[in-house]
Image (cartoon, rainbow, N blue to C red):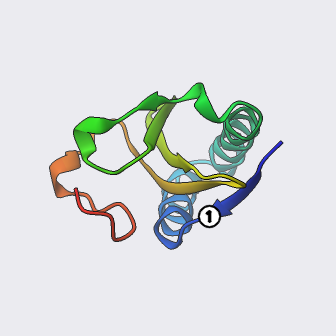
Amino acid sequence: MKALAYGRRAEDDILGIVEYLVESSARAGERFLDDLDETLSRIRLFPGYGRLRPDLRVPGLRSVPLRDWVVYYVDRPNVVELVRVLSARQDLTLVSFNGFPN
């Protein structure tokens, strides 16, 4: 299983999602974190699991759906870098991927 590195923007994304969810239900925030943990474990075991995203012009960027969100990551030689966790409805033309051009 590969190591996992959280990009700064990914951490901010996750915090924002959890803050939003717990406004209505603490349990909703917990469920999201549980589902995210399961998804990240799968990605760490099978880094090629996600769909390549050449449309976003970030070398090696992959995505995996997670309920109402999408997890974006890059598979590096010794680590999986979590880049963003965004709403599935997000307009990706308005999004930055950790300093990567989009």
The residue beneath circle 1 is: 6
- Front-most of residues 79 and 88: 79
Residue name at image x 73 percent, y 41 percent: 44
Horizontally, residue 81 falls left or right of residue 71, namely right
> What quarter of the picture does the C terminus occupy?
bottom left
**Image point (23%, 37%), residue name:** 55
Q: Position of residue 24 (x, y in %)?
A: 54, 49
Q: Quadrant of residue 5?
A: bottom right
Residue extending farthest left: 93
Q: Amino acid at mark 1?
A: Tyr
Residue name at image x 33 percent, y 51 percent = 58
- For the N terminus, the quadrant is top right
Compare residues 99 and 16 and report the one nearer the observer: 99
Residue at the limit of the structure toward the right, as seen here: 1
Residue 1 as seen in the image, left or right of residue 23: right
77 relative to 65, above or below: below
In this view, the residue in front, 77 or 48, is: 77
Residue 61 in the figure: left or right of residue 43: left
Residue at 46% x, 36% y is: 63
Give the image location of residue 69, x and y in percent.
45, 38
How packed mark 1 is, by other alpha carbons closer than 10 Å (few <14, some 14-19, many 20 or more), is some
